[in-house]
Image: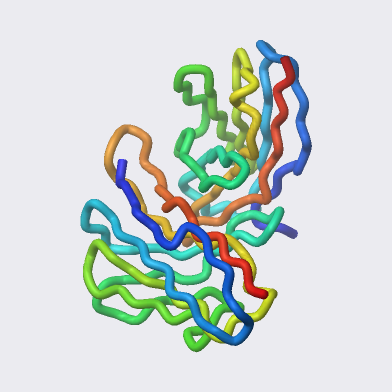
Amino acid sequence: QKEVEQNSGPLSVPEGAIASLNCTYSDRGSQSFFWYRQYSGKSPELIMSIYSNGDKEDGRFTAQLNKASQYVSLLIRDSQPSDSATYLCAVKGGKLIFGTGTRLQVFP
Amino acid sequence: SAVISQKPSRDICQRGTSLTIQCQVDSQVTMMFWYRQQPGQSLTLIATANQGSEATYESGFVIDKFPISRPNLTFSTLTVSNMSPEDSSIYLCSVEDLKGANYGYTFGSGTRLTVV
């Protein structure tokens, strides 16, 4: 079983729609959860971090965490073509472990 | 957030040679992390570099192949030794970033290595 799992996609959404990205993890002792965006040929950049169950909002982004279900998600509202990228979920227990990423395509 | 300067940004190297990658951080950090991202894959942690002690390597990575230096709290190098085409990858350094409201890990711009 992979430690951090994501659907590789691509996830295609029209401009203005909500994009929903999902991630599951295996280590119940994980304490910190991160979403990164990576454009092709660039390094990952942090979008959000979340530590407690529930929702955390930052602008058009909302991270959701459910530790009981070992599930973390990222919602992107009003998706823009510039949001087209690979989104990496990362989970920190003892060390930081990355999922394989979901490629998001936002079409006009 | 922390700013990391990583170089070189890319290189093409001959099989059997070595390449040293440098990362300079604009603030003092306890730990620096080195990752590898193979084409189309996610990030895999190679090792954690602490100042004043030997680096801690992850399973599958050894010091002879990936020696690391950490001479001070703002700088680290990773050497990829005796390279083969399988070492072609993007190598990234990272630091734990405690500044700002969004705690997380910041990455350098990456080194794209091609071994021929």
Q: Quadrant of residue A102?
A: top right
Is A74 placed left or right of B105 in the picture? right
Which quadrant is home to the C terminus of chain B? bottom right
Residue A31 location, x and y as percent?
47, 48
Q: Is residue A50 visible?
A: no
Residue drawn at the location 52% of the way across and 27% of the way down: A54
* Count of numbered marks: 0
B75 in relation to B94, above or below:
below
Residue A93 location, x and y as percent?
49, 56
Residue drawn at the location 22% of the way across and 70% of the way down: B72
Is A17 placed left or right of B23 in the picture? right
Residue drawn at the location 46% of the way across and 65% of the way down: B34
B78 in relation to A100, above or below:
below
Residue A76 location, x and y as percent?
60, 22
Is B42 placed left or right of A11 in the picture? left
Which quadrant is home to the N terminus of chain B? top left
Q: Quadrant of residue B114?
A: bottom right
Q: Nearer the viewer, residue A63 or A59?
A: A59
Q: Is residue B6 visible?
A: yes
Q: What colour scheme has been applied to the protein in the rendered image?
A: rainbow
Residue drawn at the location 35% of the way across and 81% of the way down: B54
Residue B36 location, x and y as percent?
56, 64
